[in-house]
Image (cartoon, rainbow, N blue to C red):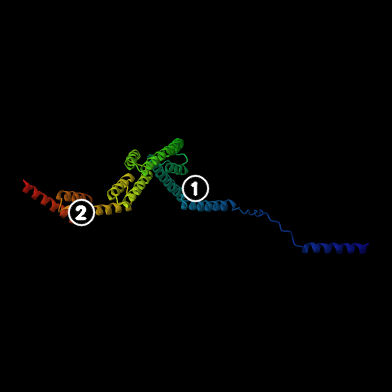
């Protein structure tokens, strides 16, 4: 028993020694540090991105001339950055430009409308509404232009219908006139020259503006003139060439050349005939020279002989008295 008590006492002493050697627990009265919360920057980043995007779109629209779209983006920028005075100033500048441009298009529309150009006027007022959708004057002008355009379109259709009727009537009239003209030309070609020319002149007097038909008449008369010239009938040929030019309204160049040549030829012809009879019959010679001077006043020899013949005739008349 005594040995057991000693062993127990030794164990107890060893335990006390171990406990005494162990570190004492640390007890603190301080509050635990607060948990750090990292604030999210997502809203700030989204607003910055939106501002950059609308600023870019506003610039692109302004460069393209689309002031209305530029103003829409600038209004968004003012909402995103309400404390930025530059944004408000830019928006106001764009709105002023829109009002000025709208006034310019409205003035153009009014001027075009007064000038009767409804298409240009309509485009101008449409530009006004693109810039200023609430512009009541532009909307009213567009309604009135659309009504006027519709009325004009209906009038044009009616006018085209009348023109078609006129064309049909004109074609029928021309067909009748063509038959009538052909009959008159045949009368002349058949040999009744005087009656034929009279009928053709009557037709030209009734249809002075029908150039094609008048040219047709002129060619037919000129053909008769060539036939007469070929037969040596110079005076007849000359008269026909002159009538061909009158009836056609404008003579062909070759007709004018033939007229000139025939006049010179007739002047020479009457000069020669006067010279043949001048010694025997001065009065007859003077008549020939007068005829020749009427056809060719530029013939110097003929004019000289005519003057000399008249002086000689006057001397003879004084002697006889």
Could one spot residue 119 in this view of the protein? yes
Q: Secondary structure at mark 2?
A: helix
Q: Pointers 2 and 1 in contact (CB under 8 A)?
A: no
Q: Which residue is mark 1?
A: 69
Q: x, y percentage for residue 120?
A: 42, 43
Residue found at the very far right of the displayed protein: 1
Looking at the image, the residue that sits furthest to the front is 280
Residue 260 lies, with reference to residue 176, above or below; the image says below
**Left/right of residue 85 with respect to residue 290 in the rendered view:** right
Which quadrant of the structure image shows residue 140?
top left
Task: Give the quadrant of the C terminus.
Answer: top left
Give whichever of discs 2 and 1 has the lower sequence position.
Answer: 1
For numbered disc 1, what is the local secondary structure? helix
Q: Which mark is residue 149?
A: none
Q: Position of residue 82 (x, y in %)?
A: 49, 47
Q: Residues within 10 Å of mark 2 (few under 14, many from 20)?
A: many
Q: Which residue is mark 2?
A: 271
């Amino acid at each position: 028993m005594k040995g057991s008590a000693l062993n127990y006492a030794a164990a107890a002493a060893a335990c006390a020694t171990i406990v005494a050697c162990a570190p004492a627990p640390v007890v603190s009265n301080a509050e635990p540090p607060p948990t750090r919360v990292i604030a999210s920057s997502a809203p700030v980043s989204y607003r910055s991105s939106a501002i950059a995007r609308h600023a870019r779109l506003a610039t692109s629209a302004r460069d393209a001339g689309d002031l209305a779209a530029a103003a829409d983006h600038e209004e968004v920028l003012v909402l995103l950055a309400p404390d930025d005075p530059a944004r408000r100033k830019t928006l106001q500048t764009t709105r002023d430009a829109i009002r000025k441009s709208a006034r310019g298009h409205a003035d153009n529309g009014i001027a075009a409308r007064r000038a009767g150009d409804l298409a240009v006027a309509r485009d101008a007022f449409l530009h006004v509404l693109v810039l200023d959708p609430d512009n009541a004057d532009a909307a009213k002008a567009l309604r009135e232009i659309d009504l006027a355009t519709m009325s004009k379109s209906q009038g044009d259709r009616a006018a085209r219908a009348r023109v078609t009727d006129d064309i049909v009537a004109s074609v029928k009239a021309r067909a009748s006139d063509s038959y009538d003209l052909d009959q008159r030309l045949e009368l002349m070609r058949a040999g009744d020259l005087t009656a034929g020319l009279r009928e053709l002149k009557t037709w030209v007097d009734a249809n002075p503006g029908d150039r094609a038909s008048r040219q047709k008449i002129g060619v037919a008369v000129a053909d008769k003139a060539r036939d007469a010239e070929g037969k040596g009938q110079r005076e007849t040929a000359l008269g026909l060439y002159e009538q061909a030019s009158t009836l056609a309204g404008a003579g062909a160049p070759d007709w004018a050349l033939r007229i000139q040549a025939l006049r010179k030829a007739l002047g020479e012809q009457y000069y020669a005939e006067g010279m043949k009879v001048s010694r025997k019959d001065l009065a007859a010679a003077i008549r020939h020279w007068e005829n020749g001077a009427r056809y060719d006043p530029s013939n110097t020899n003929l004019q000289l002989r005519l003057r000399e013949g008249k002086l000689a005739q006057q001397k003879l008349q004084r002697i006889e008295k």
